[in-house]
Image (cartoon, rainbow, N blue to C red):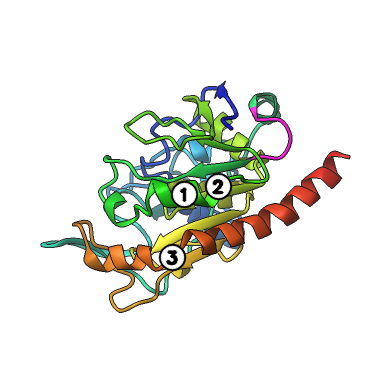
Amino acid sequence: MAQGILRTGLLRRRVDMGLGDEIMAMGEAEALYEATGRPVAICDQRSKPRWHEAWENNPAVSRVLGSGVDCIINCPGKRSYIQWWRHNPRRTEFILEHRARAGKICFTIEEECRARAMAPGGVFAIIEPGTRASLRSSRNKDWGMERWAEVIRDFPVPVYQFDIGDATPLLKGVGIIDSDDFRISAAIVKFAVLVLTIDGGMHHLAASVGTDAVVVFGGFCDPKITGYESHANFYSDIDGSPCGCYAPCPHCKEALELITPAQVRTEALKRIGGAATCHLTQEN
């Protein structure tokens, strides 16, 4: 049964606007900050500091570049996990040795209180199929709405989906969270017991706020590069993986088809069981 609509002011357009890249950039800044004790400006290719609201309140990240502030270059066109982009055909060449670190989104007490008040009551999960026309790589990460529907059929806890609003299809039977405030949205994800999603901004967000996740990678990118060991990552390590291709790709289609709803559902139920028990213990 549908869980209703929560109009909270959440995540609209943010999951597919480079959010994962900015969370990993924050993680890179945190690693340098821990090594040197100096805050870090995250800069563009002209060494000009950039800013993203995910970095707010994080002591590792500086808005300005000056004395006692280090600089890293991490921006669109220059990402730490990408070797280069090829243009014909369009594809990404990954740095296979790269290991992602999700920087921590640092919420204020007010933000957490607002999110707690707006979040679904009790134990709940969040699903983000993550397939949008605005994502160039989406077609090769699209596991299919039918498969996701099979995963959450008769799920033991309510499942919610953010209404991101740019032609993202909504699964039947899920509760809808309709909002446009990124930081409150992120804090609501923190209160979920599980995130179900593809390789994308939502799995980085889950790692950033410490929420468990089941992630379908397929064959576009290897979770060793942009995934997290604490999550359950479904990757098809077949010939051609990781592909990085943006055009419709038979390899990626095969890689996704090798991952079955039964496999993903089994892992999700296992993680929901342990997480729900822990959550209920904490509530009591």
Residue pointed to by mark 2: 152
Residue shown at 29% from the left, 45% from the top: 135
Residue pointed to by mark 1: 148
Residue 140 image point, x, y percent? 29, 57
Using the image as rendered, state which of residue 33 and residue 92 is in the foreground: 92
Q: Using residue 34 as the reference point, say whether residue 283 is left or right of it.
A: right
The part of the chain drawn in magenta is 119-124
**CA distance for labels 3 and 2:** 15 Å
Label pair 2/1, CB-CB below 8 angstroms: yes
Tag 2 secondary structure: helix
Asked whether 122 falls inside the magenta stretch, the response is yes
Asked where in the image residue 94 lies, by quadrant, the reply is: bottom left
Q: Earlier in the sequence, mark 1 or mark 3?
A: 1
Using the image as rendered, state which of residue 4 and residue 237 is in the foreground: 4
Residue 164 image point, x, y percent? 41, 31
Residue shown at 23% from the left, 66% from the top: 250
Q: Quadrant of the N terminus?
A: top right
How many numbered circles does the render carry? Answer: 3
Tag 1 secondary structure: helix
**CA distance for labels 2 and 1:** 7 Å
Residue shown at 46% from the left, 25% from the top: 180
Question: Which residue, as the protein is rendered here, is positioned at the far top?
Answer: 7
Residue pointed to by mark 3: 259
